[in-house]
Image (cartoon, rainbow, N blue to C red):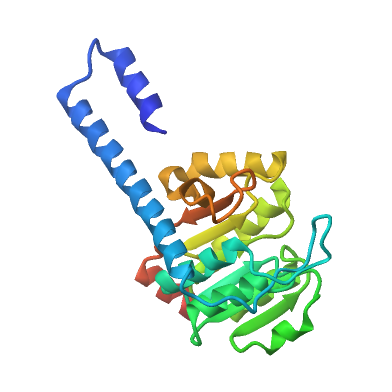
Amino acid sequence: MALFPRLAGRLGAHDRPTPDLDRRLATEALQASARDTALAQMIRHAWAVGQTIGLDEIGYGPAHWKGEKFHAAPMPYYFFLAGLARSQGCRAICEVGTHYGGSCLSMLAGAGNRARILTIDIADINPGLAQAAGITRLTGDANSNAVIKAAALHFAGKPIDLLYIDADHRFAPTLTSLGLYCLLLRPRLVVLDDVLLNPQMRTLWDVLTAAYGASAINCADIVPAIRDPMVGFGLLKLLPVPASASGMAATS
């Protein structure tokens, strides 16, 4: 996306582009295409891996939609989350928005026994979730001082593998959660549910795609079975934290 303003500026100053400009633009376009292809391949692979993971006992819980009070079956995106956790070797995971714990349990099923998952919600509607080995519950507002501090201490200053946000579904609270937990926990992957659910979430997704370019992708555009394309399921691939920076954070 950034190529076009730069190209327009250069063409305004010269009658025709220089060979150096042509080569640089071609290289940048190829690199952006390669990143997009790699991210799309990651999504397809995660979805395929997720189909091999048994989630039959994991349900959504109390339904938000009309006509059904309790949804006992796994949601399609649970298989993607499980497959992503397994295929990307995710061990340290933070979830903002627990609900009944279906997403959390799916990621645990994919990540395996070595996983450490911290899940945060304003309510605790499934007390049995705390009995699952590898899962730690925090009850409270994810953007409050107390919960933010507890989450940072839980991971002891070490970067996490995956941040999953599925909570407020408004622009400001979701962006606040994203900024705070990315800054403190430094995840390499971020997943956001419902990125097209309403005007505020669509605005947020527009902002994120403008900021991250080819490193932001709606998984439903790649595999529509993951999530209703009208609702969306966003994925951000962040730059890895240098080992030196990670070590300094862990020891400071």
Residue 131 lies, with reference to residue 2, above or below; the image says below
- The foreground one among 55 and 212 is 55
Image location of residue 189, percent across then percent down: 48, 62
Residue drawn at point x = 36 percent, y = 71 percent: 244
Which residue lies at the image location 50% right of the left edge and 75% below the top edge? Answer: 53
User: Where residue 57 appears, x then y in whole percent?
Assistant: 64, 79
Q: Position of residue 87 (x, y in %)?
A: 41, 70
- Quadrant of the rendered structure where residue 89 is? bottom left
| Residue under the image location 72 percent in, 52 percent down | 169
Residue at horizontal 33 percent and vertical 42 percent from the top: 32
Which of the pair 27/250 is nearer the observer?
Answer: 27
Q: Is residue 102 above or below residue 39?
A: below
Horizontal side of 52 relative to 33 (left or right) equals right
Q: Is residue 210 left or right of residue 63?
A: left
| Quadrant, the N terminus | top left
Q: Quadrant of residue 149?
A: bottom right
Asked if residue 137 can be seen in this view, the reply is yes
